[in-house]
Amino acid sequence: MTNDAHVSAGEETKTQSFEADVARLLQLMVHSVYSDRDIFVRELVSNAADACEKLRYEAIAKPELIESGEPFRIEIALDPERKTIAFGDNGVGMTRAELIDALGTIARSGTRAFLDRLAAEDAGKEAANLIGQFGIGFYSSFMVADEVVVETRRAGTEEAWRWSSDGKGVFSVAPLPLIEAPARGARVILHLNADSSGYLEPHRLERVVREHSGAVAVPIDLVDKPGAEPRRVADGAAIWAKSKSEIAAEQYVEFYRSLSGQFDEPALTVHWRAEGRHEYSALAFVPGSRPFDLFDPARKSRNKLYVRRVLITQDADLLPGWLRFVRLVVDSADLPLNVSREMIQQSAVFAAIRKGVTNRMVQELTKLAESEPERYAKIWEHFGAVLKEGLYEDPERRDALFKLARFTTTTHPAGDRTLADYVAGLRENQTAIYYLTGEDAKRLAASPQLEGFRARDVEALLLADPVDAFWISSAVGFEGKPFKSVSQGVADIKAIALKDGVSTPADASPEVATLIAFFKQTLESEIAEARASDRLTDSLACLVAPEFAPDRQLEKILAAHGRLAERAKAVLEVNASHPLILALARKFAGGPDKALIEDAAWLIYEEARLADGDALSDAPAFAGRLRRVLEKAFA
């Protein structure tokens, strides 16, 4: 049979443009200079290893796909004369449609945001940390190559294809004679540019492979030049199956980088073998920096599940969402191989493994927090906002997560305060853990609602993450002390002694009480109540939520997302000792200028709204009131 007989009839070379985001990405790749271009080796080796693992899985149902018995391997071949490097694997390979879909588009969410950030950053500052995270590692080839060719044959088919591109906006796909194609799998050939010829030196490439890909679960061979014997540079032994005593710290780092697609070092490595009712090996990493798409709503988990060294899925739901920053591999012998991936993840054994892995990660984080608080502080800095999601989503683990949580407070602005330390520092007669929710801790610290607490040296948690408004509303308390909002209901802090040198705020005089009643009448369309405040010392007034209404920050969030038909009217609390309030009360009692006092009431209310972070509901009306009051004041 001639070579042509192995080429699909009627098929011919077709050239087409990259998807818009890919074209933009390639522009950045080709025209930017990155601080470490070695990442292309890591990304191509990782892709080859994934292809082998996919075929290993498919062969469970179709053993004929690997009937040759050839062991899985990756081969990197150098050709100094042609100035090429070829990355070959005997994995699953690709069909024509899969080639176009995989190499012509970017499917993973968050790509546009990634591109915007990559374009905005100084070239090289974050590129190495971000490229692999978005499933676009293949395109890193164009940092070192003028042309990239992919020759591939899908396992179990009689067709082969050649994909090629110079990275300038288009690519072509053409039939490939079987005699020129791999028996199965893919071969990625890089035609190196003038600045990248150093990668043709065998020792340099071997060093890069060992450094970045030495822990992949498929053996890697290096061919120094055409006709040379392959040399094994990585044994392909599963690192998670080894004893911890056999693994150097550098090997853990290598594997972490391959697994996560990041270029940093892990902040925490946890390697264990669970024995008992269910047996499995697990290797988990907490990244040393925050993944770019950590808060992307479409983000999938990045946890690999193996069953007896067979990769089942790369996005197993092995951890709850509030541990989504962890990079994890689990290999179990107890799960079945002859059912679908979906059924495996719905099994009781999988659920037990998921629970065990989650518990272990919480235990290890707690141990680190207690034994090495400075190391743990870095993890909390990057992932604290995510961990706090567990306080809302996982009430059963809330007590354990409270031990991990760190807070910004009025006395500890660095954000390193634990609840245990807070409770240990309670003032005499203080019966609650006070908190204030909002959008910015610095702004919260200046909130007028805190004045009375500060005057009594009472510490308050400043909760500025969006999830805080949710978990705090459902949390009962900590060590027998309930959580109480500074901006909700009556402050009830008079029993706590004032600091030395701070005088007790005066109770409202009859004249002030009459003025406050007038405020209530004037503002009845906007407020639920007006009353004298025991939480203010300097400000004129503040707004608080009624006793049994939702916290004001939670109300804002729910309203912004259309989950609240109407916000509850706030309570206006007035500082009965403030000189301006006393002056207004005297003026009101001595034959009032009703229009002036009405304008003053509205201005005091609107000032309280502004201090609370709300926008004015009627800016022209506010400006008119302010002008009239100023005119009368200086007339």
Image: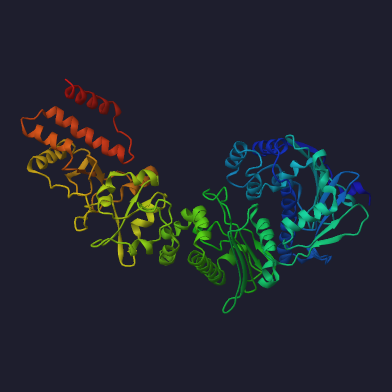
Q: Does 596 sit left or right of 108 as displayed? A: left
Q: Does 287 sit left or right of 421 as displayed? A: right
**Residue visible at 18% across and 40% down in the picture:** 578
Task: Identify the image quadrant of residue 72.
Answer: bottom right
Return the x and y of residue 225 as percentages of the image width and height: 90, 52
**Residue visible at 74% across and 41% down in the picture:** 143
Residue 390 visible, this angle: yes
Location of residue 120 with respect to 277 vertically, above or below: above
Residue 185 visible, this angle: no
Return the x and y of residue 43 as percentages of the image width and height: 72, 51
Task: Identify the image quadrant of residue 277.
Answer: bottom right
Q: Does 574 sit left or right of 385 as displayed? A: left
Near-viewer residue (610 or 320) = 610
Return the x and y of residue 361 as percentages of the image width and height: 53, 66
In the rendered image, the residue lying farthest to the front is: 501
Location of residue 498 with respect to 421 vertically, above or below: above
Task: Identify the image quadrant of residue 245.
Answer: bottom right
Quarter of the image containing the C terminus?
Answer: top left
